[in-house]
Image: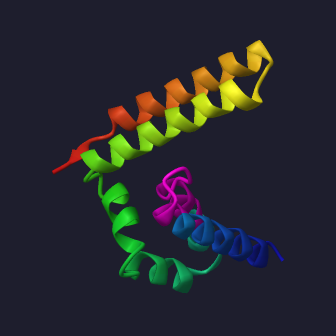
Amino acid sequence: MMKMILIGIGTLCVIFGVIGVFLPVVPTTPFLLLAGACYMRSSPNLHKRLLESKWLGPYLKDYYEDKGITLRAKAVSISCLWLSLAISMVFFIEIFWVRVLLVGIGSGVTIFLLSRKTKK
């Protein structure tokens, strides 16, 4: 039963990761990392297929092998992150502490991305 749940979650994460390739607001790598973790625990065959994928494999391999994130990917990720947070805070979020929380989360994600090695 748990194996099927992990395969289902992994598959959903792959779908969201693919959407993230085309929509810059949706993160790609975190979803693919989660998919890889789910597949690793439930289906070695699916994990292998994900890593060998022509389009998705490089995202994971670069991260696993600590090669880093391209400068373009960092810039796009951070820009989209802060743009979406700003739009949310201006148009949708009226509660002050929620805005502060969003700034904290955005700052944490930004620091994390900037602390990763930059791939040449």
Residue 6 counted in the magenta span: no
Q: Quadrant of residue 95?
A: top right
Q: Which colour scheme is used?
A: rainbow
Q: Which residue is drawn at 62% across and 33% down?
A: 87
Spot occupied by residue 93 in the image (x, y as percentages of width and height): 76, 26
Spot occupied by residue 116 in the image (x, y as percentages of width and height): 33, 39
Choose between 17 and 24: the one closer to the eye. Answer: 24
Check the image and report above or below for 41 versus 97: below
Spot occupied by residue 31 in the image (x, y as percentages of width and height): 57, 59
In screen coordinates, is 29 left or right of 31? left
Q: In which quarter of the image is residue 57?
A: bottom left
Specify the principal SS of the magenta part. helix
Q: In which quarter of the image is residue 96?
A: top right
Quadrant of the drawing holding the N terminus = bottom right
Q: What stretch is highlighted in magenta?
A: 20-35
Q: Which residue is drawn at 61% across and 72% down?
A: 15
Choose between 79 and 69: the one closer to the eye. Answer: 79
Spot occupied by residue 39 in the image (x, y as percentages of width and height): 59, 73
User: Can you name the residue that lies furthest to the right here?
Assistant: 1
Q: How many labels, in total?
A: 0
Q: Residue at x 52, y 59 (%)?
A: 23
Check the image and report above or below for 108 versus 1: above
User: Can you name the residue that lies furthest to the top here?
Assistant: 96
User: Can you name the residue that lies furthest to the left here?
Assistant: 120
